[in-house]
Image (cartoon, grey):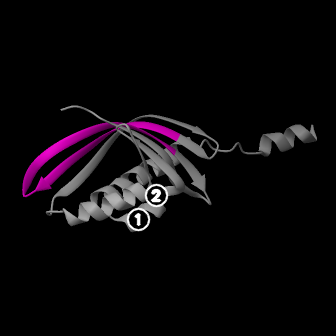
Amino acid sequence: MFILSIMSCQKEEPNNDAEAFKKVEQVVQGVFDNVWAAKNAEAISKYHTDDFIILEHGEVWTNETISNWCKEAKLRDEGTKRINTFDFFKAKKEGNRVWMAYHNYATFKKDTILGKMQWLESIVAVKQDSIWKLEMMHSTRIPK
């Protein structure tokens, strides 16, 4: 009887999948706004693990590749603004790892809309020292 009363008083761990998914979605938004749109190589470590890779339309990119891209993109920047939006449609969590699939939409503007692009992407995020970071991304451009 004593064991049953103790067990009935214990609270179950709340399902924190939804909270984890929201935090990882914020990481995805942040990396696209602060690294890709702002071309800020210094922000990479805030959003990526040290061994992060992206499979980018048939190429393998590392943090170093992305850092070099940021530097080159800043040199050719003509004031075009990139606005990122996402449609997250699938997510799974297992321990300290989250997998997500989503559509990535970018609108490029300079005074007026210059262009739009879309990608189908997936990410793997891991929780390190209570912070979610991207470990891997797979990105495929969607033809116009």
Tag 1 near tag 2, CB within 8 Å: yes
Seen in the image, is 125 located left or right of residue 66? right
Q: Secondary structure at mark 2?
A: helix
Seen in the image, is 5 located left or right of residue 127? right
Q: Position of residue 64 (x, y in %)?
A: 43, 59
Seen in the image, is 109 located left or right of residue 97? left
Q: Which residues are magenta?
A: 99-124
User: Residue type at mark 2?
Assistant: Tyr
Frontmost residue, 12 versus 2: 12
Rate crowding at label 2 as few (under 14), some (14 to 19) or many (20 or more) other CA atoms within 10 Å: many
Q: Main secondary structure of the magenta part?
A: strand
Q: Position of residue 121 (x, y in %)?
A: 38, 38
Which residue is located at x 7 percent, y 58 percent?
A: 111
Rate crowding at label 1 as few (under 14), some (14 to 19) or many (20 or more) other CA atoms within 10 Å: some
Residue 105 is inside the magenta segment: yes
Image mark for residue 47: 2
Residue 31 is inside the magenta segment: no
Q: Quick check: 100 above or below 49?
A: above
Which residue is located at x 14 percent, y 63 percent?
A: 78
Q: Quick check: 97 above or below 41?
A: above
Q: Position of residue 60 (x, y in %)?
A: 43, 44
Q: Work out whether residue 39 can be spotted.
A: no
Seen in the image, is 2 located left or right of residue 53? right
User: Residue type at mark 1?
Assistant: Ala
Which residue is located at x 57 percent, y 49 percent?
A: 126
Which residue is located at x 34 percent, y 38 percent?
A: 57
Q: Can you tell which quarter of the image residue 137 is in?
A: top left
Q: Secondary structure at mark 1?
A: helix
Q: Which residue is mark 1?
A: 43
